[in-house]
Image (cartoon, rainbow, N blue to C red):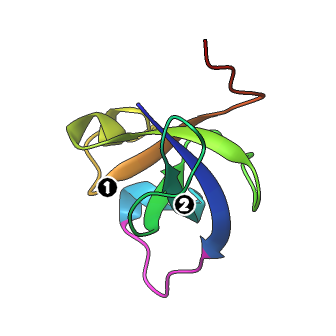
């Protein structure tokens, strides 16, 4: 799983059948110190509760499709949950 921050929303003009009603959010990947790393990505929101500014954790690759109600839809990243806080030891 990866850490990220929601920085915006995406509104598609055409929606794949299995993704109807699933929000698409723009996510900035973060490193373990909560610093931006890489380019922003588009992720499906399986929680349907994340919004701009929230700290989230997401999954990438094949596992991303398994987190949604309709399995094996064509997605690369899916938000799994909202993070309350990060504490490094």
Residue 41 lies, in percent from the top left, at 43, 65
Residue sitting at x 58%, y 80%: 11
> Does residue 77 belong to the magenta stretch?
no
In-front residue for pair 17/10: 10
Q: Is residue 1 above or below residue 78?
A: above
Residue that badge 2 annotates: 27
Residue sitting at x 56%, y 56%: 22
Q: Look at the image and give the residue range highlighted in magenta.
A: 10-16
Label 1 to label 2, Cα distance in Å?
14 Å
Question: The C terminus is located in which quarter?
Answer: top right
Residue that badge 1 annotates: 75
Residue 28 lies, in percent from the top left, at 53, 61
Which comes sooner in the sequence, label 1 or label 2?
Answer: 2
Q: Is residue 69 above or below residue 75?
A: above
In-front residue for pair 20/37: 37
Q: Comparing marks 1 and 2, which lies closer to the viewer?
A: 2
Residue sitting at x 24%, y 44%: 61
> SS of the residue at dot 1?
loop
Residue 10 lies, in percent from the top left, at 57, 76
Q: Is residue 87 above or below residue 42?
A: above
- Whether residue 48 is visible here, answered yes or no, is no
């Amino acid at each position: 799983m990866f850490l990220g921050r929601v920085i915006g929303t995406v509104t598609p003009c055409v929606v794949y059948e299995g993704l109807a009603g699933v929000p698409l959010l723009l996510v900035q990947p973060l490193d373990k110190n909560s610093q931006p790393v890489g380019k922003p990505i588009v992720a499906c929101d399986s929680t349907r509760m994340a919004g701009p500014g929230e700290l989230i954790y997401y999954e990438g690759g094949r596992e991303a499709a398994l987190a949604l109600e309709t399995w094996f839809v064509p997605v690369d990243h899916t938000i799994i949950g909202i993070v309350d806080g990060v504490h490094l030891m």
